[in-house]
Amino acid sequence: MRAAAFEFGGAGIRINAVRPGSTLSSERAALPENAGMAAAFTTETPMGRLGDPKDIARVVRFLAGPEAGWVTGQTIGVDGGMDQGRGPDFMDAFFGENVMNQGSNPAEGEMTP
């Protein structure tokens, strides 16, 4: 990113990137199978919600417009502060805590059949 900003900056070309966080459109949020994953991310995001695709689009619009005329070589995180938190436990979120706890015997350190 920074190398490209140096290479193209002299020509007036700005180079930036957007690093989106977890987003969920309103249509997909209504699907029951997304409820558990959405809840896992929501509780671990400082803003307390998942992003909407429009959140990302607004930052892209800013970067493409004259307001960002002095911005180059940057990667802008648009994630509601998710990169500041610890994030959800993906294994529990994907498979459920009950599934992840099956089959291990921590007292003996062995897997049970």
Image (cartoon, rainbow, N blue to C red):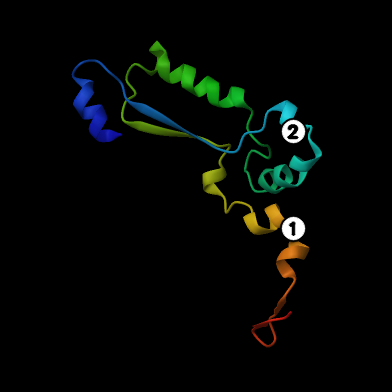
The residue sitting at the front extreme is: 113
Where residue 92 sits, quadrant-wise, is bottom right
Quadrant containing the N terminus is top left
Q: Residue furthest bottom?
A: 108
| Vertical position of residue 87 compared to residue 1: above or below | below
Sequence-wise first label, 1 or 2 = 2
Q: Which type of secondary structure does the marked residue at label 1 adopt?
A: loop
Residue at image coords 74%, 62%:
97
Residue 74 percent location from the top left of the image:
36, 32
Crowding at label 2, few (<14), some or many (≥20) Cα neighbours within 10 Å?
A: some
Query: Does the CB distance between marks 1 and 2 fall below 8 Å?
Result: no
Residue sitting at x 40%, y 30%: 17
For residue 89, above or below residue 75 = below
**Helix, strand or loop at mark 2:** helix
Q: Is residue 58 visible?
A: yes
Where residue 102 sits, quadrant-wise, is: bottom right
Q: Which residue is mark 2?
A: 29
Q: Which residue is mark 1?
A: 96
User: Outermost residue, top direction?
Assistant: 66
Which residue is at a point 81% across and 39% down the rendered structure image?
A: 32
